[in-house]
Structures are given as structure tokens and as C-alpha cells.
Amino acid sequence: MENHQEPIALSSFLIERRSLYYVKIVVTIKLVPNPNAEKQIDPQTKRLVRTGVETVLNPYDAYALEAALQLKERAGGDTTVTIFSMAPDSLKEGLRKALAMGADDAVVLSDEALEGSDVSATAYAMAAALRTLKFDLLVVGGLTDDSSTGAVPGALAEHLRLPCITNARKVEIKGDAIEVERETDSGYQTVRGPLPALLTTALTFGEPRYASLKGIMGAKKKSIATISLRDLSLDRPVGTAGSKTELRSFAPPPVRGKGKVVEASDGLSGAQAIFDFLAEKRLV
Amino acid sequence: MKNVIAYAEHRHGETRKVTFELASEAGKIAAALGGKAHAVVLGPGSERLAEQLKTYPLDTIFLNDDADVEAFLLDPIVDYLEAAARIAGPSLILIPNTLSGRDVAGRLMARLDAGMVADVVELKPDQGAVVCTSPKLGGALITQCALRPADYGIVTVRPNAFAVQAGGAGARLEPLAKSVGKSYRAAIESDVEEGAGELALEEAPVVVAGGRGLGGPEPFDTLLKPLARALGGAVGASRAAADAGWVPYNLQIGQTGKTVTPTLYIAVGISGAIQHKVGMRASGTIVAINKDAASPIGEFSDLLVVGDAFRIVPELTKLVETSKGSLS
Ligand SMILES: Cc1cc2nc3c(=O)[nH]c(=O)nc-3n(C[C@H](O)[C@H](O)[C@H](O)COP(=O)(O)OP(=O)(O)OC[C@H]3O[C@@H](n4cnc5c(N)ncnc54)[C@H](O)[C@@H]3O)c2cc1C
Ligand SMILES: Nc1ncnc2c1ncn2[C@@H]1O[C@H](COP(=O)(O)O)[C@@H](O)[C@H]1O
């Protein structure tokens, strides 16, 4: 199936941006269960239990937000950073953390019909919502902590017809172009593309900042707008009906118990203990 | 979903073991589904790799040595893969779970309106569907997800999960036409290799990883590298070591780094934080060297040796080297 949706009107974006003299940045943020907390799957729905579990900004997304905030500081003027998240209404207050770090406002796509969306349905619905926000730069995290497909950024770029530049560790906006130094599997590259564009950031971009007290106070007054599927035009189902994968079963991995402990009195005895252990397992 | 396509990632014809793992698995699954297995090889050096792939259980190797593949970021690759997929019809598409593989997979998923499962370690055909096993939530759960028969299905495959097995009647090479009317937008202006020629971390059978306990960059070269070399493995690191700038980020293992599944993992001066654990917990055997007996790494290591890494590692390297010498 081709994308029947109209591509994002690149030219109108550019014209609008030129006349406004500012850069509008949107950052996608997923709220995920605390990575350090015990995770549970509801055996009935086969979905991750998200109620009663503390949520945090997905770690990669905190880096994406940091990158956006740095770009905003450098660009100056009326540059804005808007957070976008697809999340149940009950979680959306969790985005105050992102607002406290310095984002200007937030938009949440929330709809019961989105429940059960797999990665293809999620990316499709997110794209439909992002299409209604105008932006010059869309900054997306590289990977979520819970579903960890890493497929959403590429899929968003396709649906929105945006150039897709991933794993950025340095970014420069020059007029209507973006120049990026990006990490690859075996080194790094410099890449240049037109705006609007989609960017994902590498962790080397810099540690996410802490929210200041002023930021936390200010965040209370910032807007978190909600949109639902009724506000969007979709030409394919989302939620469980729009998903293309079916979770059949799940189980914890085989337990990995505590093994042998050897106190090494000196270097050689420690080395010998390891060597003998490896020899026994035929690993040397 | 009858046919299977393996995307053969490479640089100038140089490829990693995962490419042969994908080609081997493609043949196996296609046979089980009653379809054909293909590979797609793109960019300069394609012919060289295609020749190597001929000995794998593949039917057709689609190729184009188009220089644009190296000049533009992923756009041409996605176009070519889409073209190959349209020829094969609703098929299972295997892509390595590398940084660039993930980007390709996401884009192709949207293009083909495909189902997708990430980080797959096992594939099982089941009445036309394909059931994929993949660890989720940092390995805290192992899931089984089915891709539906009528759809394209995209799978990113974890390196080191599938066996390499050559064999087959000799695949046919078939040029893949360049898509017309497509615009490539992200231009690659320079491309730098770091640590070229070294064994890739994700597919090394042995990983010797160092952490903050090593205290600086030098021990990675003087302590860990010799041990890794003696064991035929690669050096990795914790985030603390990468953050300190002691090693490049592409050596980082864990939640925000690489996931590795070597036969043997040796953690040197690494405390075993949960974010590190998720990147190496599926290793075959885990050995830790740590001067703190209460370090969390001991909770999931098969052997914890409590002692000073600076004294133990050089002796261990000598023992391994001597044993190799006595065998040859
Ligand atoms: C969002 C997020 C993502 C993260 N992602 C990752 C990730 O991908 N990978 C990762 O590794 N971490 C990650 N971390 C960081 C993680 O929480 C730990 O901080 C990190 O793993 C600690 O690294 P370390 O074990 O090298 O250092 P430490 O925890 O400081 O441990 C050093 C160890 O060395 C031992 N030691 C010291 N000297 C010696 C000696 N001479 N001989 C032997 N042992 C010695 C000490 O006893 C100690 O156990 C992440 C954290 C966050 C918040
Ligand atoms: N529900 C969501 N809301 C906002 N952003 C999301 C959502 N799902 C995925 N993303 C973004 O897409 C990135 C990659 O996600 P994934 O492909 O699921 O690993 C994340 O780091 C987020 O930036």
C-alpha cells in the first residue's frame, strides 16, 4: 500500500518559516515506565501494565529534548520547542518534566482507539498528528525503552516525506539547511539536508539538563493540549485493528543465578581461577 | 508471506558475519514457507559481496553498484529495497539490527505498510505466518510475535543469533533497476571509519569489557586489548568509560549502547548496573573481575573473581597465550 496521505507541503513550510524568522522545533517524547522498576505484562490484554508504575521521559527522548533546547538557545529569537507525545490522557501530566527542562508547550495525542497500536499503527497515528503541527525540525529519540523497535523515526520521516538524519552528535542550522555530524556503526559522517527535516540524536549530543526550580514552577503554567483521532484524517485503522503484529506469548528469560565467587589473593591466583573455569567450559 | 529477502549491508564489499547469518536464515525460512530466498546488495563493491553470497541458499541476488548509495543517506537503499520487495510480493524481509539497519527497517515498514518485529533471535514459520522471538524491555521478557501471512513483514535481526550455513545450488545475480523520479535529500559529505578492520563488537564470540574501575584510557589498550586478542574477541566498555572519553561510544554496551551476546563476556571493573546488564545479560558465560565482592555484577555472573584487575588481567592473558602455544 502506498501512502495515500498528501505529503507534507515542504514549500509552504519554507515560505512560512522565512516570513516568520524563527525556527519551530517539535520533539517527540514517550512516557515509559521507570526503566529500573519491575515490568509486568497483563496476562489478559498482553499489554505492559502502565498503571501504578512511575513513568519517566524515555531516556533517548530526554537527549533529543536536550538537543532541541540547545538548538533553541543557539538560534535565539522566537524559536520554540513543542513536545509531542502519543499517550493515554492519564499519563500526560508526566510531560511537565519536559516542560520544566525548558520546552515551551506540549501536544498529546490521546484516544482510546489507539490502545494496542503496534509500531506501524503508532508511527502512522503519530505522523497524522504531527502533520497538523507546523515545524521546521522534528527531533525524535532513537529508541524507546519499552518497545525498543527504533522504527518510529524512519517511519515518521516516510509518512511525513521528510529527510531523515539519524544519530546526530552535532547539528548546525544554516538558513534552510541542516548540517549534521552523525554517528554510524563504524565511525561518523557529515550529512547535509534541507529543512524541514527529521533528526534523531545520539547520546553524545550532551547529558539532558536538570530542571531548575524556576523551570519547575514555570512548567505548571505551560499548556498541554490534547488532540484525539477525531481531529485527524486517517485512511487506515490504528489501535489493535490497525496493528500488523500479534503478540502470541511472552515469558521471562531463564533465570541467571549468582555463580561462583573466588577471592583472589594475588594476580596469578585470580587469573588461574578464571583460566581453570574457562578450560572446564572449553572456552579456552 | 512466502518469499524471504535478506538485506546484505556492507561497505565496499566488506561485510560482517551478520550478513551471512541473514543469508543462511533466509534460505532456511524460505524453504519452510515454500518460497524463495533472495538477497539485496547495493552500492560500490556489490559484485564482490554478491559473488561471496552465491554459495548461500539463495535463489536470486539483486544488486546495483549505484554510487548514490554512498553519497546519500539511506534514501537510495530504501528505494532499492522497496523495488526488490515489490518484485518478491508480500515477503519476509530480514535486516540486521544495526544503527543503519534500524533506520532502513523503519522507513521500509512505512513504505510497504508492513508488520515489523525488532531485535529478533529466532524465526518460526507457522501456517503461513512467521513467529518471531525477541527479547523486550531490556531482556526482562522474551516475546513471541507473529507477522501475518498477507502482509510484508520486516524483521531486524540480532547479530550472532543465527548460524552461518553456506550451501545451495548457486544463486542467480540479477541487476536491480534504479527507481526513477525519486529525490535524495540528505547528502553525505564525508564518511570516517573508526577502528576499521577490527572485529565488530556485536558479533565477537568473546567480549572483554572495561568500566570505570580501569581509571583511564590506557588500560583499554594495555590490559584489555591483549586479553581480547588472545581470546579472539573484541573490547567493549561501560557507559562510564565511554562518557569519560576513554573509548569511543561505539564500544558502549547496554541500554543506550550495543547489545551483545558473545559466548564469553568478561567484565573488568564494571559494577553491573541494570542499564549495563540489559546489553549483555544474554551472553553465554559471564565472568567478572571486580575488587568489590558486593558489586551487583556478582549477582548475574557465572564467576566473580574478587581482586585487582591490574594484577589479574595480565596474568590471565599470559595463561591464555601459553595454552594456545601448547596446542599449536
Ligand atoms: C538512561 C541511562 C542509560 C544508561 N545506559 C547505560 C549503558 O548503555 N551502558 C552502561 O554501561 N551504563 C549505562 N548507564 C549507566 C549505568 O547506570 C552505570 O552508571 C554505569 O554502567 C557504571 O559504569 P561502571 O560499571 O563502569 O562504573 P562503576 O559503577 O563506577 O563501577 C566501577 C567498578 O569497578 C570496580 N573497580 C574499581 N577498581 C577496580 C580494580 N582495580 N580492579 C577491579 N575492579 C575495580 C569497582 O568495584 C566498581 O564495581 C545508563 C544510565 C542511565 C541513567
Ligand atoms: N507514543 C509515542 N509518543 C511520542 N514519541 C514516541 C512514541 N513512540 C515512539 N516515539 C518516538 O520514537 C522513538 C523511537 O521509538 P521506537 O521506534 O518505539 O523504539 C522514541 O525515542 C520516541 O522519540
Image (cartoon, coloured by chain):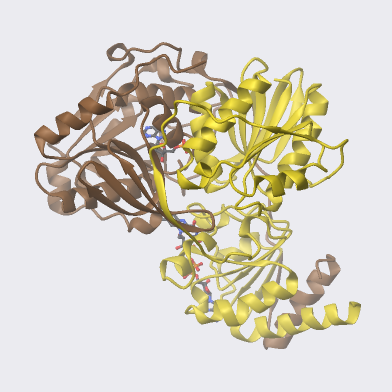
- Nearest the viewer among B318 and B55 is B55
Identity of the residue drawn at 80% across and 66% down: A283
Identity of the residue drawn at 90% across and 77% down: B327
- Nearest the viewer among A184 and B309 is A184
Q: Colour of chain A?
A: brown
Q: Dividing the image into four equal quarters, which quarter contains ligand 2?
A: top left
Q: Quadrant of residue A272?
A: bottom right
Q: Does any portion of residue A209 appear in the rendered image?
A: yes
Q: Height in image: A80 above or below B220?
A: above
Is residue B123 found left or right of A164 in the rendered image? Answer: right
Question: For the N terminus of chain B, which image quadrant?
Answer: top right
Q: Quadrant of residue B173?
A: top right
Image position, residue B121 (x, y; %) = 69, 41
Q: Colour of chain B?
A: yellow
- Nearest the viewer among B223 and B51 is B51
Is residue A208 found left or right of B222 in the rendered image? Answer: left
Image position, residue A162 (x, y; %) = 36, 32
Identity of the residue drawn at 65% across and 21% down: B87
